[in-house]
Structure formats: C-alpha cells, structure tokens
Amino acid sequence: MGIDFNRIAIKIGSNVLTRRDGTLDITRMSALVDQIAELHKAGIEIILVSSGAVASGRSEVCPAKKLDSVDQRQLFSAVGQAKLINRYYELFREHGISVGQVLTMKENFSTRRHYLNQKNCMTVMLENGVIPIVNENDTISVSELMFTDNDELSGLIASMMDAQALIILSNIDGIYDGSPTDPGSRVIREIGQDKDLSSYIQTSKSSFGRGGMLTKTNIARKVADEGITVIIANGKRDNILVEIMKNERLRMKDKGWDCPITPDDNPSSLIPNPLNYTRFIPSPEPVSSIKKWIAHSEGFAKGELHINHRATELLFSDKAVSILPVGITDIIGEFEKDDIVRIIDFNGKPIGVGKANCDSSQARETMGKHGKKTVVHYDYLYIE
C-alpha cells in the first residue's frame, strides 16, 4: 500500500472507545488497532493520542463517597489509564508492534526545553518502531491547567512531531452544514482557510469527553495553518483509517481532486469512492518549528503587549516585522525574558502571541521610544 503520508497523528475520542454505559468498547478498540497496525506495517509512523482513561476507570471503581469533579477525574483516570494502556499493549503485541505510554500535562509545553524533551522522547520511540500512546496525565492535572480536551493535545502533538496529517476520530462523520441529527444535513468534505463555519458548528459537548465540535474546528484550523492536513472522521465506521489513507493517496495522485468542495458541490464527481469525512486544507506555506510551538502557546502567556494602530497595520502587512518599543502603548502583567506574551491590538483584541526578548520591567522602560531593542522578534511571533 503506497501512502504519501509518512508520519501521522491519530486522536481517538472517548465516545469512540466507550459504550453508552461508560465501559470500554474492546471490539471497537481492537478494530482500530488492526487498522493502525496495517498503516504501521505500510511504513507510516503513527503517534496515537487516545482518550478513554477516565471513562474506562468509571466502569471499574465505585467511590466510597461523593467526589468533586477533580477528585473523580483523578481517581477514574489513575485506574482507567492502567487498564487502557494494558489493553493497547496486548492488542498491538498480537501484531508484533511495541507501544510506549506518554503521559503529559499542559505545562510541559510551556517552556521550549520541556517541549523539545517531549519531542526527543517520542522521536526516539518512532525511530525504534515504537508507537507512542499519548494522553493527558489527569491524575495530577487540575482544572485550570488542563487541556481543553485531547483535541487540543493532539493538535500540539501533531505540530510538535512535524506530522503530515492529524486524524481526529469522533462519533460523527465530520463537520456538517446543519445539525448532525437533521436528515437533510451533509458533511462538508473540504474546508479552505477562509471558509466561515460559525453558522454550522454545534457547541454541545460529548458524553464522556470534555470537548465539542467547536473545539475540534478551532484546533483543526490552527493545525492546518501550519501546513498539516487535518481530517475529522467517524471512528465507529469500519476500516475508516485505512480507507481515509487510500482516499488521500488518490487525491494526491491527481491534483484535479485537490480543490475546495463546498456543501453545494457534488463530492462524488470529484472524489473516487467518496467517504464521509471533513478535510481541512493545509496551508502551502511551511512553518518553522519554533513558530509551531509559539502558535500553540497562548494558554501559557504571562503578560500582554498592547500595540498602536500603526504597529497593528504592519503586523498584518506582507512585511516581516518585529514588535518594537515605539509601537507599544501598554504592558500588562509581569514576565521574564523568553516568556510567552499575548499581543493585543489598538482595539483591545488579542491578535497573537510571541516570545519576549526582555522582561516586563525592561519593556516598560523603553515603551514608546524609538531606536530601542526589539521586544518580540519576528521569528518568535505568531499572528492569528
């Protein structure tokens, strides 16, 4: 099976891996492992981001007393993660494939050093034929430090590991042009960078996971902007992963199929053996490793740089510009050199993030002045 992607991240959601009663769906899990093993044996490096620990633990433990949401999450995930990784170990072993567990937290992405340590760990695993199975370490994460859900984590992992594609498996077929429960709604097959989805997205969350389609869409857009193909598909459909990869190979072989498809188009006339899934078209522009890290660092920002109208215009122009003290009108919060800071435009709207080239006191000393040292260099700046 000749496939054009050589490294992909696959995220499996809680609602794919669990039955309605919250127990682990071993049959579905086994079918997905069979598909991943087939792709792995075809030469594709796989990073698996798997939910299901909390839902898995929920079916194993009956708390002695009523627990708050954090305590409950810690208890269920501690028990459930052991059960989940053991199942994966046994299922992949039947295919002669080794797996390794990677438990991470949001703050592990907050510094460049921790970020690169994680990347190195998973790179070594892939070089040795081991599939990393990644999940959030819910046993020590607390609410304010948690990822929005594993969609956010999978976006970070795909970006960090320079994957060519991120496949997010949910329990519906993709992004619909109406409510998924409406028989007249259709899956939007391809989404370009300028496509407005605000009228389509459902804000409801899944039964066992923390995220919804809005989260998936926001993550998908950001990752696609970094040049990574993002696919949202139904993980409960038989052989979905293998069929997606075959379909993507056909698309790549004939550039005539590489055009945006809107809900008004007839997808069957454009794609052979059409599958119901949504594909976010990746940006053709390459993004540096450091910019990928910064693009996902908004949640770690220590302060804010407010900039004037002229500086805002320059940032959105075709020029490669840095943020200079002369364009800064206000500095909120305290930060050290190399911390992540938010960039706020003259209307008070957040427009990006960057790595500070000095601390907040030095920035305040030079604010509004000409001829002073750059506060955020272009190479360490991400404008949304």
Image: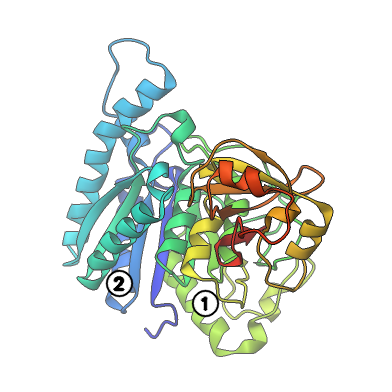
Please name the amino acid that badge 1 sits on: Asn
- Where is residue 192, by image quadrant? bottom right
- Where is residue 347, by image quadrant? top right
Mark 2 nearby-residue class (10 Å; few <14, some 14–19, many ≥20): some
> Which is nearer the eye, 91 or 72?
72
Residue 40 image label: 2
Residue 97 image label: none
Residue designated by label 1: 247
Q: Nearer the viewer, mark 2 or mark 1?
A: 2
> Which is nearer the eye, 292 or 340?
340
- Residue name at image x 34 percent, y 52 percent: 114
Q: Position of residue 296 (x, y in %)?
A: 53, 53
Q: Is residue 86 left or right of residue 305?
A: left
> Which is nearer the eye, 43 or 135?
135
- Residue name at image x 43 percent, y 66 percent: 241
- Residue name at image x 56 percent, y 77 percent: 273
Tell me if label 2 and label 1 are in contact, CB under 8 Å.
Answer: no
Q: Earlier in the sequence, mark 2 or mark 1?
A: 2
Q: Is residue 168 visible?
A: yes
In the image, residue 247 above or below residue 99 = below
Please name the amino acid that badge 2 sits on: His
- Where is residue 140, by image quadrant? top left
Q: Is residue 360 left or right of residue 118?
A: right
Identify the coloring: rainbow
> Which is nearer the eye, 356 or 301?
356
**Mark-to-mark CA distance, 2 and 1:** 17 Å
In the image, residue 334 above or below residue 176 = above
